[in-house]
Image (tube, helix red, strand yellow):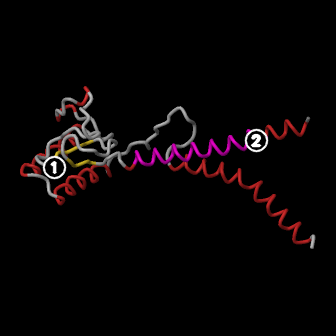
Amino acid sequence: MREFFLGVIVFFGTMGLLMGGGALIIMGGSEMSAEADRYAVQFGNPGDDCNWRAPLHIDIKDGARTYCGRRGAAPPPWRQSVDTTTFKGFKGFTDGQRKEVLTLSSQLGSDGLSETEQQQIQNRVDEIAATVSVPPVNEFPGVPGPPGLGRILLGVLAWVILGIPYLIRHWRERRWRRWSY
């Protein structure tokens, strides 16, 4: 009977490490992806499929701020207006810095945005972002532990801990077989 309970505890411990480690890896990857897109500018035509995490979408025809979402889908009610005065993207930017980016895009895009002009706008956003100090993205604030890469490392650690007993057992069996001949 004692072996049965020990087996149940080992089973649930193994499943907890396996699933918990996997969940931490997925959550950390999601946060790292959000971190990479925090200051991304998406260029395209209104209604094009796009990177929905990008906080700013610019129309390549005229450089104006536009809605970008799933192809064929209407913008949600809170995005019906793309008034430049209500843009609150780019966490840590001041209102003046946001306005500077929007002004630059409308000036450069008066006759359409070329690849060079698109890169110039993204470079300006990156220059401003380098001066901003914001905490890392934490998409799962209810989950304890460090966000992003920290969660990925905790997940990998759980899997390593799960693999150590298997490796020891495998090594012992292999060693025993070597001496039994």
- Which residue is nearer to you in this view: 157 or 123? 157
- Which residue is nearer to you in this view: 150 or 178? 178
Relative to residue 13, is residue 170 depicted above or below? below
Pointer 1 or 2: first along the chain: 2
Q: Residues within 10 Å of mark 2 (few under 14, many from 20)?
A: few
Q: Which mark is residue 91?
A: none
Tell me the element at label 1: loop
The image quadrant where one finds the C terminus is bottom right
Magenta segment boundaries in residue numbering: 10-35
Q: Quadrant of residue 66?
A: top left
Q: Amino acid at mark 2?
A: Phe
The residue under the point 87% across, 71% down is: 178
Tell me the element at label 2: helix
Spot occupied by residue 107 in the image (x, y as percentages of width and height): 9, 48
The residue under the point 21% across, 48% down is: 44
Spot occupied by residue 20 in the image (x, y as percentages of width and height): 62, 41
Name the residue beneath numbered marker 2.
11
Spot occupied by residue 9 in the image (x, y as percentages of width and height): 79, 38
The residue under the point 84% across, 39% down is: 6
Give the Cα distance between marks 1 and 2: 56 Å
The residue under the point 80% across, 37% down is: 8
Asked if residue 152 lies left or right of residue 35, the reply is right
Q: Amino acid at mark 1?
A: Ile
Tally of marks: 2
Asked if residue 54 lies left or right of residue 4, the reply is left
- Magenta: main secondary structure equals helix
Q: Residue furthest front?
A: 72
Spot occupied by residue 30 in the image (x, y as percentages of width and height): 46, 45
Name the residue beneath numbered marker 1.
60
